[in-house]
Image (cartoon, grey):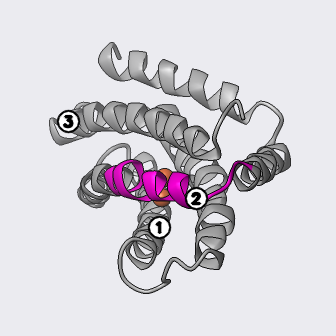
Amino acid sequence: MLRKATQVLEEEHRVIQGMAASLAIVAEDIEKRKPVDGETLHNFVTFLDVFVQRCHHRKEETYLFAILEKKGVPTEGCPLAVLNNEHAKLRSLSSQFADSVELYTATQGQARVSLQKTIHALLELLPGHIWKEDYLLFPMADKLLSPEEQELLLTQFENVEARIGPNIHHDFERLAKRMEVTAQHP
Ligand SMILES: [Fe+2]
Ligand SMILES: [Fe+2]
C-alpha cells in the first residue's frame, strides 16, 4: 500500500491550517479598521464551503467516520460524537461567516463586529478539532483499518473530489498559497 487514506486527510489539514493563518492576519486588519477587499473575503467563503465542507468533511463524515462506526467505534462520546458535533458547529460558523462577509462588503466595512466574532469563533474551534483528528482519530483509524479498507477509502475520497471538480486539490493549494501572500503583503 503506497498511501493511506488518513494521510490524505492529514495533508488537507495542513492546507486548512495555512488558510486559517491567513485568516488570522486578515482578522487583525479588520480589527484595526484597515479595509479588507471583498475578493479576499469571498475566497475564504469559497474555501470553507468547497474545500472544508464539501471535500474534507464529506470524506470524514460520510466515509471515515462511517467505516469506524461499522468497525465498532462507539457513536457516542469521544472521538466520533465530539468530532461530529464540532463539524456541525463549523458548518454553522461557515454560513455565519458568509453572511457576515456579505454584510461587511455591502456596508463598505462598517458592519465588522459580526465578522470579527465569527472569525474569532472559527479560529478558536479549528486548531483543537484538527489536533483531535491528527493525534487521536487518525492513529486509531490506522490501527483499526486493514490495507484494503484504507484502499477503499482512498477510492471513495477520489470520487468525492471528482464530483466537486477534477483539480480541487491543486486549485485550493494554490489559492491557500496566494492567500498567504495576500494576507502578509496586502
Ligand atoms: Fe473533522
Ligand atoms: Fe479533518
| Residue 19 drawn at (x, y percent) | 42, 35
User: Is the C-beta of the residue carrying label 2 under 8 Å from the nearest atom of ligand 1?
Assistant: yes
Quadrant holding the C terminus: top left
Magenta portion: prevailing SS class: helix
Inspect the image, locate mark 2, and give the three-letter code of the amino acid beneath it. His
Inspect the image, locate mark 3, and give the three-letter code of the amino acid beneath it. Glu
Q: Which residues are magenta?
A: 131-147
Q: Residue at the far bottom: name it.
A: 76
Inspect the image, locate mark 1, and give the three-letter code of the amino acid beneath it. His
Instruction: Using a 10 Å C-alpha cutoff, classify the residue at mark 3 as few (fewer than 14 neighbours), some (14 to 19) or many (20 or more).
Output: few
| Residue 127 drawn at (x, y percent) | 30, 49
Q: Quadrant of residue 36?
A: top left
Question: Disc 3 vs disc 2: which is toward the camera?
Answer: 2
The kind of secondary structure element at disc 1 is helix
Most foreground residue, 108 or 155: 155
Decide which of tag 3 and tag 2 comes sooner along the chain.
Answer: 3
Q: As drawn, is 94 to the left or to the right of 171?
A: left
Picture mark count: 3
Which label number is shown at residue 87? Answer: 1
Q: Which residue is mark 2?
A: 57
Which label number is shown at residue 32? Answer: none
Q: Which residue is mark 3?
A: 28
Q: As drawn, is 133 to the left or to the right of 176?
A: left
Q: Is residue 76 above or below residue 106?
A: below
Task: Determine contact: label 1, label 2, CB under 8 Å.
Answer: yes
Q: CA distance from mark 3 to mark 2?
A: 27 Å
| Residue 82 drawn at (x, y percent) | 37, 74
Q: Quadrant of residue 114?
A: bottom left
